[in-house]
Image (cartoon, helix red, strand yellow):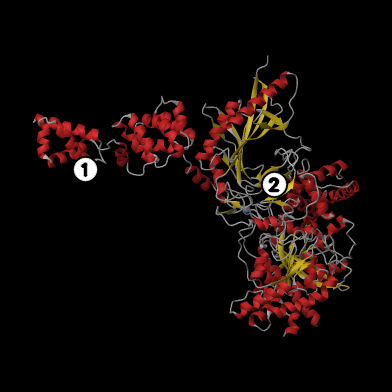
Amino acid sequence: MTQWEAVIGLEVHTELKTATKLFCGCPNAFGFEPNTSVCPVCLGLPGSLPVLNAKAVELAIRVGSALSSRVQASQFHRKNYFYPDMPKDYQISQYDVPVNAGGAVVLRSGKVVGIVRAHLEEDTGKLVHKGGDGRIGGADYSLIDYNRSGVPLLEIVSEPDISSAEEAKEYVSELRAILVATGASDGRMEEGSLRVDANVSVRPVGSTELRTRVEIKNVNSLRSLGRAIGYEVERQISEYESGGSILQQTRHFDEASGKTLPLRAKEEANDYRYFPEPDLPPIAPLQAEIDRIVGELPLLPAGRRVRLFGLMPGASSDQVEVAVTEEVWPYVVAGIEIGVAPELVLARAANELAALVGNAGFLTPERFAEVVALEERFSPSQVKLLLKEAVSFDGTVDELVAKVGLSSSGAEDVRAMVGEVVEANPEEWRRFVAGDAKVAGFLLGQVMRKFGKAISGAQAKAALEELARGAAGL
Amino acid sequence: MTDGILTLDAGALSAAVRSGEVTAVEAVEAYLAQVAVQEPEVDAFLSLDADAAIAAAEAVDRARASGAALGPLAGVPVAFKDNLCTTAFPTTAASKILEGWVPPYNATVVDRVLAAGAIAIGKTNLDEFAMGSSTENSGYKITRNPHDLDRVPGGSSGGSAAVIASRMALLALGSDTGGSIRQPASLSGIVGLKPTYGRVSRYGLLAYASSLDQIGPMAATVKDAALMAEVIFGHDPMDATSLRAPIPALVNALMEGVTSFRVGLVSDLLEVASPAVASAVGRAAATLAQLGAKVETISIPELALGLPAYYVVAPAEASSNLARYDGVRYGFRGNGETAEEMMVASRSEGFGDEVKRRIMLGTYALSAGYYDAFYLRAQRVRSLVRTAFQEAYSRFDLLLSPTSPTTAFKIGERSEDPVEMYRSDVCTIPSNLSGDPAISVPFGDEDGLPIGVQLMGPALSEERLLRAAFALESARAEEGER
Amino acid sequence: MTSGISKADVVHVARLARLNLAPDEVAAHQEQLSRILDLVGAMDDDRLAQMPAMAHTQDLVNVLREDVAVPGLPREMLLRSAPDVEGEFFRIPKILGEPE
Ligand SMILES: [Zn+2]
């Protein structure tokens, strides 16, 4: 029986995190009232002209550099087709000369997925289908909100190097991590700032042929992506095995049934009639500019892994994966930088911190480092408690420790504080040293009244007893 | 003084308004009286607003009374081609698809002209979306040539040309994609300047062919055209193709003459002209030579390729630029059960025949399998034409040719034959393809029908073009006096 | 270059351009477009192959805008000129199928 393998290429559209749209000064923001972030340009009013956003170009180059793409001189083209959510009835996109060509994403497993291109284009408006069953085909009419029209997108096209649903998910999450690390995107799939189309075909293992592919449009979560590809691969295999063939078509993933379903067949083949956008002169980034952007790139997830495994060759890869995420990484860096043992930093970051980081409050990377450093003196469970408390505590780390009832003061300091109280109460001290245990409560009470914020009762007691042993020994 | 208002040029009228010799209201009333007489015959305006013009003039007079400094066009009545966005008037590009559409913003040029103190009288007729050479393709009406009401004023800026020729305004703006300022200027006996591509912001110009379109002044005299050019030239951050070049003092340079100029008389374009037109161009060459220019004949055979290249590039870009007229967001909406049917109905009923023809042609030229043979080839022709011009401009400061092969033709004479109509643009198209400036200036007539001659120059040579045009205009005036 | 355009081409192009042509219009367009294509077919010169395709007349590059927000248009102003609206939205008849 034939063994089959999947051949998958992904097109990831990501909204770039700019303040304004790609070609006009309207705010690029999620959650505006309908049709309130619009102007003549992004509404395509007659006479309006596009002017390119410098920040979008910079972010595109940042991503290209992070993907090891060739950043090159580029030109916008018009992609001509009619659709009501597209105000000019053409999309300004890039065609034969995209800003970024080539590149690669290295997955966790070490597998390399090639990048064909990563180009700039504008987003469309949003349609709301009304009446009927609320789905596009059965609706009575549609409403349009153009707030999203003209929002900058970067379309990242992979080579068909991906060979399973699992790998596709791994690719998207790695790419997402890169986009977030470079500051190009917030990576929120559920808000639509990351959208994935998958081109899927199958072939017998060992063959190099490319069979008819099916495009699955607009999958909006990693889980759905995996399910959609998984279903589609099985569908194609069983189609071939039962002697059938695969039609080149576009399908969408139906969450409820877990199946991919064909979209209405097109009346005509695509003919986008691309031509160079006459309203926009070419972009030709200077090498110095590209060098600057490359120089400013942060350490990317792959580099973070290398750094952690370099420090800790035996580190748990599950912990490392948590540590290299965008949210956790700054904490890891802060801890390692102040000289805390990397293993300790990794363990606390991957476990306790990861649970807190979504809502970290006052627990900044610096505070995390300070608290984890205390683990030389406190027990792990005390440190975990401190981390948890730090989220809602606005004060110094010493005050935090005191609040939790631990002392941050060193043994020397505690002895000095107790000593002060002892000197002020010579009679009680004499009785205590002489063995009158009842007076201990009084002395400790004095210590706590004076230094209670800085030291714990247990510490004070230990110091008092130690001093008494010393005194008795004299 | 008020009796002579109509005899003042724009510079003189605005000086009189600034000095208080004439009020802006008097100026505008004089022109509105002229409109009342001429417009029923000429039919040049698509919208007119006398009350608004008077109100604007009153505002200028009040500003003067309050001691405010008035602009260089203070109180000067102007007209705008109806493909320029104006918040005060509907903007239709003479298309039914935009009937009644009032833009929410002004074109940059409109803002600049109004900021200079000019008074907008109305919006002028054109061939629908500026596609045509006679203004007969308007979706609303036919404008007549004031020199002969049975003839066309030229096009596509025929309304603006007729307004100036019949003195219904002192200055007008037109747009020129393949000759649409210069050809009607020639046929209507006025001055029309197509500036270097990028000299004037296109923001707010309803695009026909974006890589060719350029807005320019139309006026009765070279000096008025120069004055308006100074107002509208200059960089605009809203247009990415707008140039940052400094604006020369155009009016002040006019008197500097042509003594040092090397002028090339383009023989290839003379050959396509009627005998009367060719002879007028010959006389213009002789005049320039008498004034001290060094005139020689030059052949630039590559220019013949301009016409076919234009009729690929312009329709291709137009097919894309006009896609947005789909009945969804503004303008005319046709009936349809589905969005798709509605869009098709809106476009099919809203566009006129010539617009549809060019959309079809351009769509075809860009479509799969034809792109290389048509669009790509036309772009190579553009390079060839530009290279040929560059060689010519290395030997000559200016080139001289007819503007139009003929004088104004009869209404209806060419409207049945698009290809014949297209040939009207053969002399003007090359400068659009290369992006260089050119001007048409009246020089003689044939049986009372004006003849214009065209001066072409390299990029940013408007000052030179205006000086030479001024020299020709002054020589004609002296001839007339003699 | 071959001239002439078939009736099927005319119908296909009209479809791409979202124009509805009556049968007599198809014939008229076929005839006129063929004539124009004859005119356009005159673009022939030995040097063309060496000429770069010229998309812009200028040598401008990197004309960029700072990423700073500017006020747009009030919604009422935009919806006022719309052929059909519902509440805060532009309204259109139902859509069949997905974009191309
Ligand atoms: Zn906008």
Q: Quadrant of residue C60?
A: bottom right
Q: Residue furthest left?
A: A474
Chain at tag 1? A
- Identify the mark at residue A143; answer none if there is no mark: 2
Tell me if residue B469 comes above or below residue A366 in the rendering.
below
Label 1 neighbourhood size at 10 Å, few (<14), some (14-19), many (20+)? some
* Residue type of the residue flagged with mark 2: Leu
* Residue B304 coordinates in the image, percent (x, y): 80, 55
**Mark 1 vs 2: CB contact within 8 A:** no
Secondary structure beneath dot 2 equals strand
Left or right of residue B288: residue B60: left
Tell me if residue B398 comes above or below residue A124 in the rendering.
below
Q: Residue furthest bottom?
A: B1
Secondary structure beneath dot 1 equals helix
Tell me if residue B350 comes above or below residue A105 in the rendering.
below
Tell me which label, 1 or 2, sits earlier in the chain.
2
* Residue A368 coordinates in the image, percent (x, y): 37, 37
Q: Quadrant of residue A400?
A: top left
- Identify the mark at residue A450; answer none if there is no mark: 1
